[in-house]
Image: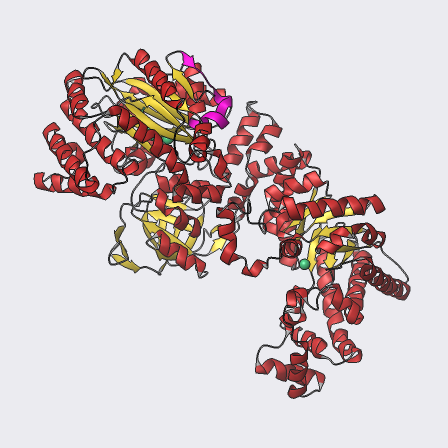
Amino acid sequence: TNWVYRFGGGVSDGGKGDRNLLGGKGANLAEMASIGLPVPPGFTITTEMCTAFYDNGEEFPDTLGPEVEAGLKHIETITGKAFGAPEKPLLVSVRSGARASMPGMMDTVLNLGLNDETVAAMARESGDARFAWDSYRRFIQMYSDVVLGIDHYIFEDALEIAKEDKGVHLDTDLTADDWQALVATYKEKVEEELGRPFPQDPKDQLWGGIRAVFASWQTERAKIYRRLNDIPHEWGTAVNVQAMVFGNMGETSATGVAFTRDPSTGANAYYGEFLINAQGEDVVAGIRTPQYLTREARAAANAKSASMEEAMPDVYAELAATFARLESHYADMQDIEFTVEQGKLWLLQTRSGKRTAKAALKIAVDMVADGVISKEEAVRRVEPQALDQLLHPALDPDAPRDVLTVGLPASPGAASGVIAFTADEAERRASLGEDVLLVRVETSPEDIHGMHAAKGILTARGGMTSHAAVVARGMGRPCVSGAGALQIDRQARTLTVAGRSFAEGEQITIDGGTGEVMAGEVATVQPELSGDFGALMGWADEFRRMNVRTNAETPADCRAAREFGAEGIGLCRTEHMFFDSGRITSVRQMILAEDASGRREALAKLLPEQRSDFSEIFRIMAGLPVTIRLLDPPLHEFMPQRESDYDDVAAASGTSVDRLKRRATELHEFNPMLGHRGVRLGITYPEIYEMQARAIFEAALDVAAEGEAPLPEIMVPLVMGAPELARMRALIERVAAEVFAERGTDIAYLIGTMIELPRAALRAGDIAEHADFFSFGTNDLTQTTLGISRDDAARFLGEYVDKGLLPKDPFVSIDEAGVGELVELAAERGRATAPEIKLGICGEHGGDPASVHFCEGAGLAYVSCSPYRVPIARLAAAQAAL
Ligand code: ADP
Ligand code: MG
Ligand code: MG
């Protein structure tokens, strides 16, 4: 195999199509070089090497050495420098880069190749000793942190002491001699920590760097990031070794990060930040507050320091031309990293930029309008899951706001929550069900779990492209960054701002669209769905084959779902209606009744209530199918809880509390989930299903008489075979005949069943003889197939996924290998008996894009999900069909 691919200086062994092999960064560096953009020369060690490295007990194969040598030779030839040479020494960066972008999650080392000898050459040749020693101290710190595992605080503390001794505040106030002295201190610290000196041999440094970057694939934070983003552990990272260019060579040098469009709003304007006389990660790390790229952005923010457009007009013009070129080359918004070395522009990275859902929609729709991409491509590009951000509430513009300060609007959306000052605390409080805002001076990749647990993120430092901002946008969390007025005391665990102090656990609110930070909680409203949303969803609807229904039982949910485009109800759970305060006593009376006549008495009270529930839903869903599931849950869920509940039931039924309690004891079940529930209730207490069927037919006829009728689909839960359904079908048909005879008119309806037991899936062939439809109840089918109780899974499921024993949480994304096979098998057997049988899915999976893809493959007619997920399912269904 060929482990090493070169780029730069007219050579590109790879290109943008080689992302799997070279990682995104490596593939795009090669691509940029091949279209003639200025890219420092380098080479990429493939992701296959990463896999081989781990398979091989973290050792490199012998063949790698010569290939790396050849790669170095390539860089040396192009730059005219030599690695480790006492004259014209070559410095390189060693950079990670996986297939999927994992911003900041893995390691990079800059300025590699510096030692006591090469630093002197750098100083001499550049005529800038300060620059040379500044680079060397950066290198020691970064290499020690990434490769040698020495805590970076050690170096930061030493730097603080040096500045204090000198009585200065800024790094830029330190001179060449100061940096040289600090390098000596750094080297002592390394020797103290390590028991051996800082490695002076550049080749040792290089191999240490390569090894460390491959190793960073397996850090805890990288693993967490992969789990949260569904990135397979087997993918591995590539390693890029690239000639250094220097943004820290004085006032004509700079480094920056830019997006070709605004990643928050999607507006077609360059958006970015840069720092003069700085290197690489200074911008992202939020060490200094960066400057704006464009004059317009600087003016809009009323910032004092010049924009790049003003400070370096020529380089800026070249950069802007490059943005346009890259955007049209990739036909997508790009996120670009660049460095200016003494007036010369260098490109260090490009990739499709992460963006908010709002920006994704706007960019996709704008690009279709401009003829850059097709409608199909636009539909393919927007991540369904991301729509979630748009469908959730924003701050009520009319609600009073107690604004404490305004930071940068780094990621849109509003969030209220209690303050947590550490990621662990955020996670802890969130696990107790609290809404949390993570409040930090700045975030680092170690905070990823806390950012995920939090409803929103607030930082005192860092710009719009800081770690916090980038990660928050990717996760869809609202974020306000760079709120400089915040004083965070980590020791005392307090936040002071505008003369007021807030302790951990106190409530605040952020608005990531305006940057406002507010005291207390602020009321929210439903967001306006923009024209872009409508346009894209319209295209999605053109392309999809499956219908999308909703799981809903309240009129409010039904209305919301229709607004979101639901084409009917796939699951209306009747039991939810039974909990209403007005009727729970009748429900309890029914359950605790000792015989059928007692039950009928209670059911008579429930009938008009159920009928009015259904007519309300049928009115909203006029003309659409409505699947109603007959009573399903274990009866114990309705049992009296308090003493007064028993009193109420006793009064309603004329029995004594003692008798009721005895009956409750008789009804106790050890494992109610697998107990007396679902169709088993219909078999033993047929009067319950009779009442429900009557309520459905009467309501449907009422609504039909007013205007348009719905199509009721009566669904029997938890059947395990044909006999149960045959019996229930007869019962329902008998009630239908009775009601139709009473009313002298009839209505179309269907009878079907849920497939949620493995036995039902296996017996689907004979069940289909009695069913007009199957609805796959994949929540229960997952529980019963895997033998995992969803409510108890939290304790071990995370570890199962981490250890690779299950690919994903099977309650979130359908377990294709197991549950999926049962679904396919049931579909096949059902269709063999009844070719026209309607098939759908109504578990939580109906709103999960990966599961929606699965359903498309299984040829289901529809998916059904909660109202807020309907747009997600519509888009996912379109993508699945494309
Ligand atoms: P990440 O994936 O965390 O962004 P990168 O490998 O992109 O890590 O490196 C971070 C930053 O380091 C880059 O944005 C760039 O500014 C700087 N950098 C990396 N390689 C070089 C180089 N060869 N010359 C100058 N700066 C570099
Ligand atoms: Mg980068
Ligand atoms: Mg079920």
The spot of residue 46 in percent (x, y) is 44, 26
120 up-or-down from 779: above or below: above
Q: Is residue 543 visible?
A: yes
Of 201 and 586, nearer the camera is 201
Type of secondary structure dominating the magenta stretch: helix
**Span colored in magenta:** 10-25
Of 750 and 314, nearer the camera is 750
Of 670 and 402, nearer the camera is 670
The spot of residue 613 in percent (x, y) is 71, 63
242 up-or-down from 764: above or below: above
**Figure disc tally:** 0
The spot of residue 824 in percent (x, y) is 72, 44
240 up-or-down from 168: above or below: above
Quadrant position of ligand 3: bottom right
Left or right relative to 283: residue 121: left
Q: Quadrant of residue 371?
A: top right
Q: Quadrant of residue 346?
A: top left
The spot of residue 439 in percent (x, y) is 34, 51
Q: Residue at x 80, y 47 (%)?
A: 830
493 up-or-down from 676: above or below: above
Q: Quadrant of the C terminus?
A: top right
Of 851 and 169, nearer the camera is 851
Residue 22 part of the magenta-drawn span: yes
